[in-house]
Image (tube, rainbow, N blue to C red):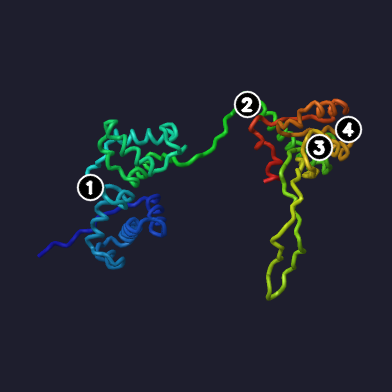
Amino acid sequence: MAAWRRAIELSLGDEDTVKLRSIAQSRTEPASRVERARILLAYREDPSFFAVGRSLGLHHQTVQRCVERAVVEGPMAALDDRPRPGREPSITLEGKAWLVSLACRKAKDLGYPHELWTTRLLASHAREHGPAEGHGCLANLAQGTVCKILDQEEVKPHKVRYYLEQRDPDFAEKMAEVLCVYRQVKILKKAAAASKQKPNEVAIISYDEKPGIQAIETTAPDLPPEPGVHATFAREHEYKRHGTVSLLAGIDLVTGTVHALVKDHHRSREFIEFLKLLDAAYPAHTAIKLILDNHSAHISKETRAWVAEQPAHRFEFTFTPTHGSWLNLVEGFFS
């Protein structure tokens, strides 16, 4: 008479149990991992191969193999398939390395009219030139194999991702100056909240321009919502262009007030007009500090001459670093 199968003791820690429950309830995990996670959780509650198999609709030997592997290799390792021997790879490591190094060059450097590789062109070039470079395994290289090799190395030679080179040697120092101004804003806000009065000695303005805004006029009036006809406002598709305009705007970082001008251009004279707008908006004793980028209108002779004519310490400019306009908070207003 065959002996009774003895229950195997399976110990699952709290961390493993949480992970197994997450996998068992997942809709994106492979079905095999979900099934094995459910086996281990069910066996933890009822250590019986037959009972678990009956509740999950599996053979008791399937349950037993999963539990035995979890005891030996760990519960998380038991969720994955064991590696299978499979066929020996026909493409050598040297051949793969040569293909990847080829993908890291531009196709136009090798005489092709294309600037970048396509996987089809790369496979064709490797089949033609690979054997001559000592990689005969690439003679029958398929396009799909090229995709797999490049995916393994995380190389995408058919795509371009832009980067920004740091060209300002004083980037860190200029950034620190801008951040110091923001620190001053925080101090002024705390002081204003404590005294319950708006500060009038310093105004800190985050300023920038947004050029190229299309001035568009509709050719017919909007139609209001009408029950049973259309639920939303209806707008005529046709429109009339009136060229483009530039928005010159600054936000008072302490009070939140927005100062704005709409002009056809954003030259020095328009920037000076915006400064005059600020000059009229604040008391004469208020120091106006502006955070702005390095646009030519901000540092032109015309602008500097006008600022020099104003009372001392009336206007103070803090420039963002080159390619560092993202430090200017008004950018969020334009986005």
Q: Considering depth in this image, is 122 or 165 the residue closer to the camera? A: 122
Q: Looking at this view, name the residue that lies furthest to the bottom.
A: 228
The residue under label 3 is 270
Q: Which mark is residue 285?
A: 4
Mark 1 or 3, nearer chain start: 1
The residue under label 2 is 168
Give how far across and how far down residue 265 sits, in percent: 77, 40
| Secondary element type, mark 3 | helix
Give how far across and how far down residue 120 sits, in percent: 38, 44
Instruction: Report how far apart the C-alphas of labels 1 and 4 lie in the structure.
Output: 82 Å
| Tag 3: amino acid | Glu
Instruction: Report how far apart the C-alphas of labels 2 and 4 lie in the structure.
Output: 35 Å
Instruction: Report how far apart the C-alphas of labels 3 and 4 lie in the structure.
Output: 24 Å
- The residue under the point 26% across, 38% down is 137
| Secondary element type, mark 2 | loop
Mark 1 or 4, nearer chain start: 1
Q: Considering depth in this image, is 27 or 214 the residue closer to the camera? A: 214
Instruction: Report how far apart the C-alphas of labels 2 and 3 lie in the structure.
Output: 27 Å
| Tag 1: amino acid | Gly
Q: Which mark is residue 86?
A: 1
Q: Quadrant of the N terminus?
A: bottom left
| Secondary element type, mark 4 | loop
| Tag 2: amino acid | Asp
